[in-house]
Amino acid sequence: MNLQPATLQKIDEVITHYPVKRSATLPLLHLIQEDIGYLPERTEEWVAAKLSLEPINVYEVITFYPMFRRKPIGRRHIKVCRTLSCALVGGYKTCAQFEQEFNTHRGEVSPDGEVTIDFVECLASCGTAPVVLIDDDLHEKVDCAKAKALSAKIKAEAGARKQESGIQNQTQH
Amino acid sequence: MPAPQQRRIIFAHIDEPGYTNDLPCYLKHGGYEVLKKAVTRPPQELIDEVKKSGLRGRGGAGFPCGVKWGLVDRKSGKPIYLIVNADESEPGTFKDRYIMHQDPHQLIEGTMISCFANNVKQAYIYIRGEMPHGARILEQALAEARAAGFVGQNICGTNYSCDIFVHRGAGAYICGEETGLIESLEGKRANPRIKPPYFPAVLGLYQCPTIVNNVETLCHVKYIVEHGGDAFTKIGTPNNTGTRIFCVSGHVQRPGYYEFEAGKITMGELLNEVCGGPLPGRKFKAVIPGGSSAKIMRFGERYKGKRKVGADMVDYDWGVEDVPMDFDSLGMIGTMGGSGGVIVMDDTVNMVEALANINAFYSHESCGQCTPCREGSLWMKKITTRMVHGEARTEDAALLKSVADQIPGRTICAFGEACSWPTQSFIAKFGDEFKGYAEAKKTAQPAAHELV
């Protein structure tokens, strides 16, 4: 597993938080996913070895919790709340708006690779519904207009990044 | 009569301009003074104050906190653990989010006082995975508190030591159930444990005695230790002491969080006056009073019976608007105060579609351990989704009820109840809408908002 030194350091630190090493399973999976973007093949073997477990002990945890994923996703992760309080004030429309903006369907990586849109269950911010979690940031009262504005911002950032890397490529050649 | 004023004891500083979530700001507002005094008192005295206060758990069940602490096995010689339940996963609930993001030291102080009172050696804050900023804020606050001697080794210069670590969940609702949470913290699937024998107070985390308390509950402990158990009983109503934070969402003019003395405000005052009433041109149709698993109330229905007021039994005859917002009154009329999540639906909502949304949630979140819950929640979802997107049949109401009726009491944990109560109560109160849905659907206006 190709992890950054900072991640490895955090992994060793977090294991000390628990009298029983197995408890560090979720924290380790979070750290690996944050570093690599998903949980690649052989994650269960690597974590199991680190925590003196059997790979099946880790595998059953990965498959239980909705936040863990086995495949890469888009550069940004847009999670739209699907549950009742958000749906009552337009959560489904918000999700459809994002899908339209990025020409994709929920659960898939957009054709340009910029985003993955997912419907998720309650994000515990029902008073400011509909809510959307983009990577780590919560966005409140996201109606269609706000979904458009957020999408435009993501697209602009993507454009700027592509331009920058284009310039770098030119200077390298 | 105007609605009573909010009484903010837990949310005293939430949204206060200039109030920040760092230690210097907390200290400036008298932070950690209660802990400093608490560690000079005999622990049993603190437990007695909490018992005297009548504090009931704010996570959903309303179980008396002092009784919970009293059940802890202190003779086994094993270490005692405390877990802060910060999973906040019941749909409609969003109070703990603000405490953790804006006033994390209040939670840490309440937690440390509770740890000292119960001779806890190690505590964990189990925060839901969808709050990454919340987890970082808590970690930062813990680091500050540790450096200042309020958490960790030799707390406030005494020989009492106890550390607190943050543990992140990963998106599973069932981790709010205390034994599921314990399994999750042990690094496993969050399959709840069977009780008996696995009462956390005796066989909890690592098979040691364990206390699991909600975020808001622990903040109340801090208030109780500061002001005394007796003073706390003067807030609220008998057996429903202290304040409650109501999280109002859905179809009202001003959704949000409001802290009131328990039982001192009615549903009508909360929705009409505090939250500004229904949206323009709409009428209230139904409300779920305590998180999405609580049984639904239908506007226009009456609740009649006898209740205890002081030493007397008094007749009551309430409409939805008249019901006092406390554990006992809501329990008496057949629903529950639960986690304080009030979800409001107006006359644009079709109840079949609303139930389909709720059923999709519970079906997604069932841990899958017990067959009645795993299969039942899935079938309730399939039936209601088919009704909305496919063919609806008049006999679906009876079919849904028969599935729902076979789940509660037949599962390891209360999720069985949580997933069947919505279906049972929606059918009981809006049965006509379910029976007539096939016909109504043919001529229906396009729904205001798609729900499933």
Image (cartoon, coloured by chain):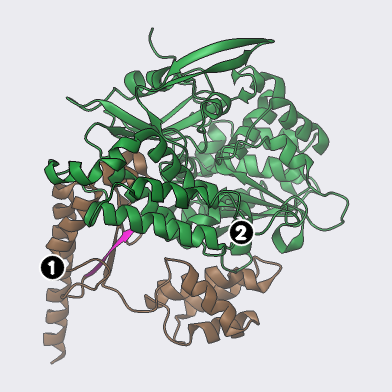
Chain colours: A brown, B green
Image side of residue B393 versus residue A163, left or right: right
Q: Answer above or below: position of B43 versus B180.
A: above
Query: Which sits in the foreground, A56 or B119?
Result: A56
Q: Residue at x 27, y 42 (%)?
A: A88
Quadrant housing residue B31: top right
Quadrant housing residue A45: bottom right
Q: CA distance from mark 2 to mark 1?
A: 41 Å
Question: Label 1, on which residue?
Answer: A103
Question: Label 2, on which residue?
Answer: B192
Residue A137 visible in the current orientation: no
Q: Answer above or below: position of B357 versus B319.
A: below
Same chain letter for marks 2 and 1: no
Image side of residue B238 versus residue B322, left or right: right
Does the magenta run of residues contain A118? yes
Q: Answer above or below: position of B290 versus B270.
A: below
Q: Answer above or below: position of A163 versus B185.
A: below
Residue most extreme to the bottom: A173
